[in-house]
Image (spheres, helix red, strand yellow):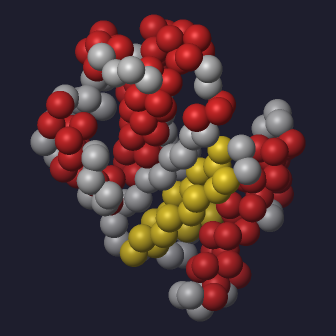
């Protein structure tokens, strides 16, 4: 990994996060070099205006990765935005789920989560959907984004396997929303 990436990895607190971050990076490079036959020189990264890493010389290739505990996921797309987020259920207790909900989510989202029997599972489902969507936008996650409630129509759309593949369905319908 390059020096910039090493610096970012070094800022992570837990060793498992450092390790999984590097593994995700290696998986990304492996797939791009073996499946797509891209040379290392084409895989140079730069940051977009929001700080999201993009491939400097292959701007038609979009990627996203996420890791939680000892699992990593890497997604690659040609010409379409992509966002991935995974979270381990074991990483959040029911008590922590309630604290996270009240601190970071809208009243509408809190109401939606509290209707379910398993607050923790519903919270992580909602969190990962919001984070993946905003990774696809390339804007990153912020308190404003978390506090913006998803409509019931958004949630239905996000239940489908490839919903985040085309984030403009949310973005273009209401560009000021996020």
Residue 14, given in percent of the width and then of the height, sits at 83, 36
- Residue 22 in sight in this render: yes
Q: In this view, does 160 lie above or below 29?
A: above
Residue 157, given in percent of the width and then of the height, sits at 21, 46
Q: How many numbered marks, from 0 up?
A: 0
Placement of the C terminus among the 4 image quadrants: top left
Q: Is residue 8 above or below residue 45?
A: above
Residue 127, given in percent of the width and then of the height, sits at 45, 32
Quarter of the figure with residue 15: top right
Placement of the N terminus among the 4 image quadrants: bottom right
Name which residue lies at 63% across and 69% down.
28
Between 25 and 71, the one nearer to me in the picture: 71
Name which residue lies at 79% across and 38% down.
12
In the image, taking residue 86 as reference, residue 79 lies left or right, namely left
Name which residue lies at 77% across and 58% down.
22
Between 162 and 39, the one nearer to me in the picture: 162
């Amino acid at each position: 990994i390059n020096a910039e990436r090493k610096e970012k990895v070094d800022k992570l607190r837990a060793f498992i996060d450092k390790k999984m971050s590097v593994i995700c990076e290696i998986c990304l490079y492996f797939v791009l070099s073996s499946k797509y036959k891209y040379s290392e020189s084409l895989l140079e990264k730069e940051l977009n205006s929001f700080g999201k890493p993009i491939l400097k010389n292959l701007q038609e290739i979009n990627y996203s990765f996420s890791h939680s505990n000892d699992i990593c996921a890497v997604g690659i797309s040609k010409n379409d935005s992509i966002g991935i987020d995974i979270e381990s259920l074991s990483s959040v207790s029911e008590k922590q789920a309630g604290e996270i909900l009240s601190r970071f989510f809208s009243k509408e989202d809190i109401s939606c989560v509290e209707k379910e029997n398993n607050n923790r599972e519903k919270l992580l489902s909602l969190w990962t959907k919001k984070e993946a969507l905003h990774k696809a936008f390339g804007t990153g996650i912020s308190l404003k984004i978390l506090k913006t409630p998803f409509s019931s129509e958004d949630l239905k759309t996000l239940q489908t396997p490839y919903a985040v593949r085309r984030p403009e369905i949310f973005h273009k319908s209401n560009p000021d929303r996020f």
